[in-house]
Image (cartoon, rainbow, N blue to C red):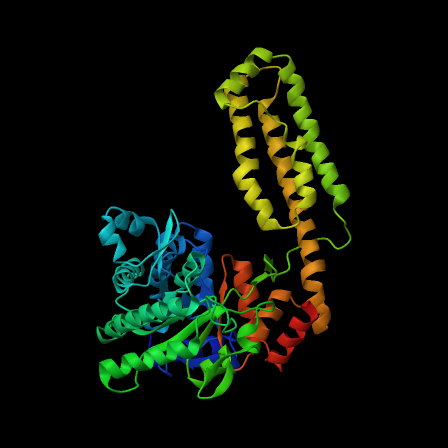
Amino acid sequence: MKFANILSTKELIQKFETRGVVRSHRTRSILRSEVMTTQLGFGTYRVHVDSPEHETSMVVALQSGVNLIDTSSNYGYGGSEELISKVLDKMSKEDSRDSFIIVTKSGYIQGALLEQILKLDLEEQAKFEAVKLSENCWHSVHPDILLMQMEQSLKRMNIDALDVMLLHNPEYFLQDCQKQGIEQKAAQEVFYARVKKSFLFLESQVQAKKIKYYGVSSNTLCLDETRYDRVSLSKLNEIALECAQELYSNDKHNFQVIQFPCNLFESKGAIDKNNVYQGQEYTTIELANTLKLDVLFNRPLNAFHEGRLIRLAQGDYNPDLKYSYEIEQAFKKIDDLENSAQVYFDNHKKVIGKMREAARRTGFFEVVKSLPDFVEKCRDNEEYFQMVQTWLWPYISTSLDCFHKFFEGDEHFDLSQFTNDYLKSFDALEKLIIQRNNQFHVQYNLDPIKKCLSLDDSIPFSQVSLNILASLPGKPVVLNGMRDLKWVKDSTSILIEDQVSSSVELLKEIRDSLT
C-alpha cells in the first residue's frame, strides 16, 4: 500500500491495547478518519541513521504504542528519513508500511540541495524565492523546491507516497521582510500569495497520489494577530478553500494538518484567542477543532521562555548535595595532574618549545586556570556541552596528542596512566556539573510549576507535561524526541495514564504563576 490505512492502523492499535501498552482514551482517528493513531508521535529532529541507539529506540517505540512518525527533509541532512527507511524495513516483518503514518516537512534548503542550487546562475537561483538564513541554510516553499524535497524524501524513506507533507516554518519569509523594513500588510500579501502557490502544488501531488494530505508546521501560528511574522490559521483555511474552488469547483481541499510548539511554558495555542472565524474568536486549537483539522504538537519538553531554552524534564541529581565542594575537589584532582605535567615539562623545556610549535599554541594542561570560573557561572547543560565541544575537548585532545608524540616511551613518566587519570578526572567533573545543573534547573524552573500543580516527585515531570498536553480538547498528537530507551519508556507511559481533567485551566494557572 502507498499510504497508511484504517484497517492496518486499527489492527495495530488493537495489538497495542491487547498488550496493555495503550488505553483506548489515548487513541484517535485522524486524516478525516482514514487512519488510527495514538496520541504520541515519534519526533525525529535529532535522530540519525548512523546511530544504533536511535535505531533501537525507534523500533522499540513502534512496538510500544507509537505509529506516527514525524520527520523533515532537513533533519540530519536526510539522515532521519534514512533511519525511518531502515526501521520500517525491520517492522515489515511484523507490521507493514500501511500501519504507520509518516509526516514529513519541506522548506529548509541545506546540504546537497543547497550545493546544487549554488551551482546555478543568479537568475535561476532567484526563481526559487529563497530566504537566505545563513551561508549554509536557505529557506523556500516554492513548488520547485517542494517537488525536489518530496522526491528526495520518498527516495530516502524508500516509500511510494507520504501520508502528510507540511510546509516547514514558512514564516521565515515574513521575518526576512521585517528585517528589511517592508510594511507588514504588503509582506503578508506576498506571503499568502506564495502559500497559495504552494497549496496548489500540494493539491496537484494529492491528485498524483504522491501525498495524501498536506498542511503547515509553524512556530508562529499561535501568536497575537499584531505580530508581524504571525501565520494565521483562518487565512490558511481561506486559501485552501480558494484552491479547492479553482481546482475542483467545490470546497473539498486536502489541507488537513497543522503543527506548532506547545508545552507548559508556551501554551498560547490552547489559551489565547488569536483567530477570528465567521465572526467568532478562537484559540488555535479551538479553530483547528472547529475546522476538523488534525493538530500535532512539537517541542513538548523544550520551551523557549524569556529568551532562553528550558528543558521540561528532570535530570538526575542528589538532593542531599549542594555540589560546590564536590566540584571544587574534582578541579583539585585535575589541578594536581596538570601540576605533575608542568613539573615534568620544566625539565624538558626544549621539547616543550617543539610541542608549542607543532600545536601552534603555548598552553598545555592549564585547564584549571580558566575553566572553574566558567563552570561556576554556567548553570545550563546545553551551554556546557557546547563549550566542551568547541573548546575543552579540542584543547585536551591537542595537549594529549602532543604529549604522546614527544614523550611516548619515556621511562621516567607513566604517560599511559597519566592520560587515563586525566580523562577520567574530566568525566567525574562533568558528571558533577550535569547533576548540579539538573538540581538548579529543578529548583528554579520546575519547582514553581510543581508547586502550582501540587505535584510531588513520585511521577517524572516530563510525564506530567506530556499528559497535560495530550489531555487538551481535540486530542492532539504530541511529538516527542525519543533518542534512547529511557525516553521511549518515559514518554510511552502517557499512553496508559488517565486523562488530566481541566487541562486548559491548568495551563492558565501555570502561565499566571510564571508572570
- Residue 179 percent coordinates (x, y): 45, 57
Is residue 87 left or right of 453 when viewed as pictured? Answer: left
135 up-or-down from 161: above or below: above
Task: State left or right for residue 497 relative to residue 186.
Answer: right
Residue 32, how many percent across, how many down? 37, 83
Looking at the image, can residue 64 be seen? no
Position of 272 compared to 235: left or right?
Answer: right
Residue found at x 28% / y 58%: 128
Res 421 → quadrant = top right
- Position of the C terminus, as image quadrant, is bottom right
Q: Nearer the viewer, residue 235 or 294?
A: 235
How many numbered discs?
0
x and y percentages locating residue 327 in the rendered image: 72, 41
Name the one closer to the observer, 420 or 242: 242
Q: Is residue 227 left or right of residue 154?
A: right
The answer to whether one can see residue 139 in this image is yes
